[in-house]
Structure formats: C-alpha cells, structure tokens
Image (cartoon, rainbow, N blue to C red):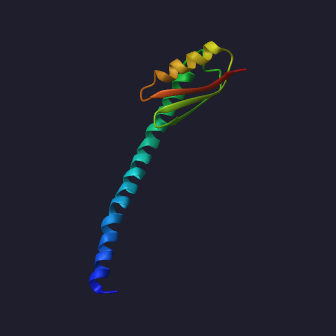
Amino acid sequence: MRPIVKTCLVASFVVLGLPAVMHTQAVAQESAGAYIDDSAITAKVKAALLADSALKSFAIHVTTNHGAVRLSGTVNSEATIGHATTVARSVSGVRIVHNDLYVQ
C-alpha cells in the first residue's frame, strides 16, 4: 500500500473514531450522574414513606431510574396504595411513579 493511502486511511479512522470515543465518555459521565441522582431520589422517597405514620409499618420497596420511581410490595388497602403514590410524587426530583403495590 502506498504511504499516502496508508496515511489517509489512518487519518480517516482517527477522525471517524474520535466522536464515538467522546460520545462514550459523555454517556458514562451522564450515567454516573444519573445513578447518583436516582440514588438520592430513592433515599428521599424511602425517608418520606417512613416518616408517614400511615405507611411506615409497610415494607414498600423503592427503585428509581432516571427520575421514574417504582414502588413495590404489599399494603393493607387500595387507599394505602394511593397514599403511597401521593407521598412518592411529592418528593423533589420524582418525574413519575410506577406503582406495583398490591393489597394482601
């Protein structure tokens, strides 16, 4: 292969590959930041549920993904399910609440 062609090929790989590397680094940084934010939201929702006298006796599991909170576990009534959803929605940073609670 001629040196000029080899140089052009190498240069094109560098130019085309650089944005992909930069994008991967940006996604990794965003993912780390999102994970920290989601962890903080989860902690705040758990604290709010435990602080509520009507909800503190139930084992309500909380997970968060990009601000979307998922509640799961068992409670004693449909009214308690609605109340847990309202409490979770009131927490700063919560975008939406997915409720997988059920009455036992």
Q: Nearer the viewer, residue 96 or 33?
A: 96
Q: Position of residue 103 (x, y in %)?
A: 69, 19
Q: Is residue 95 above or below residue 16?
A: above
Residue furthest out toward the right:
104
Q: Is residue 99 left or right of residue 14?
A: right
Q: Residue at x 61, y 21 (%)?
A: 56
The quadrant holding residue 16 is bottom left
Q: Position of residue 42 (x, y in %)?
A: 51, 33
Q: Residue at x 61, y 15 (%)?
A: 80
The quadrant holding residue 99 is top right
Q: Is residue 22 left or right of residue 65?
A: left
Q: Position of residue 33 (x, y in %)?
A: 41, 44
Residue furthest out toward the top:
79
Residue furthest out toward the bottom:
2
Q: Residue at x 26, y 82 (%)?
A: 4
Quarter holding the N terminus is bottom left
Report the label total.
0
Q: Residue at x 43, y 42 (%)?
A: 34
Quarter holding the C terminus is top right
Q: Position of residue 23 (x, y in %)?
A: 37, 55
Q: Is residue 1 above or below residue 9?
A: below
